[in-house]
Amino acid sequence: MNELATSIRNRRHRRIRARLHVTYRVGTEEHKDYAESISEGGLYVNTNEVLEVGTRLVVRIDFPDHAVSHLAEVVWAIRVPEHLRHQMVCGMGLSFIDPDPQWVEFFSRWESRLVAMS
């Protein structure tokens, strides 16, 4: 079974589809991309500039009224040829490492507001 299938099968939290700006750093190198889905335990970053599985990084997620930073680990990554990027899934899944209780509370309130608006 590939890393993506294993990661999806092992999810503990429901994903919310949301396009959020993210900034992440590995060492001194900074990247800016968009998250396409997020959960209490991690997120999917739509990018073809994927990092190696197992890489640890600090990711900042920009919500409309709040920014949150987490230590995270790449749990799956898919890179595709540039000419197929808009036709195939590419990107990486990040799992948050020890998210604090304040994050869980914030995410729960944010998710509830999204559900109420739909």
Image (cartoon, grey):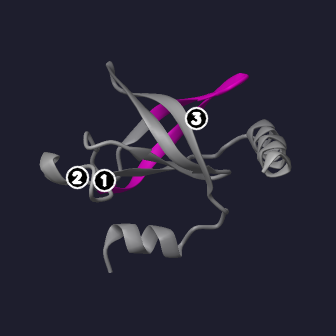
Residue 82 as seen in the image, left or right of residue 69:
left
Label 1 to label 3: alpha-carbon separation:
22 Å
For badge 3, the amino acid type reads His
Q: Which residue is mark 1?
A: 90
State the quadrant of the N terminus.
bottom left
Along the horizontal axis of the image, is 32 left or right of 18?
A: left
Point 67% across, 63% down: residue:
14
Q: Nearer the viewer, mark 1 or mark 3?
A: 1
Secondary structure beneath disc 2? loop
Asked whether the residues under the numbered discs 2 and 1 touch, taking CB atoms below 8 Å apart as contact, a structural biologist would say yes
Nearer the camera: disc 2 or disc 3: 2
For the record, the magenta segment spans: 58-77
Residue occupying the far bottom of the picture: 1
| Residue at the (34%, 24%) spot, across then down | 27
Query: Helix, strand, or loop for circle 1?
Result: loop
Q: Which residue is mark 2?
A: 79
Measuring from the top left, give residue 72's x and y in whole percent.
50, 42
Seen in the picture, residue 77 relative to 24 is either above or below; the reply is below
The mark nearer the N terminus, 2 or 3, is 3
Q: Which residue is mark 3?
A: 70
Q: Residue 75, image x and y in percent?
A: 41, 56
Asked if residue 33 lies in the magenta stretch, the reply is no
Q: State the image quarter where residue 49 is shown.
A: top left
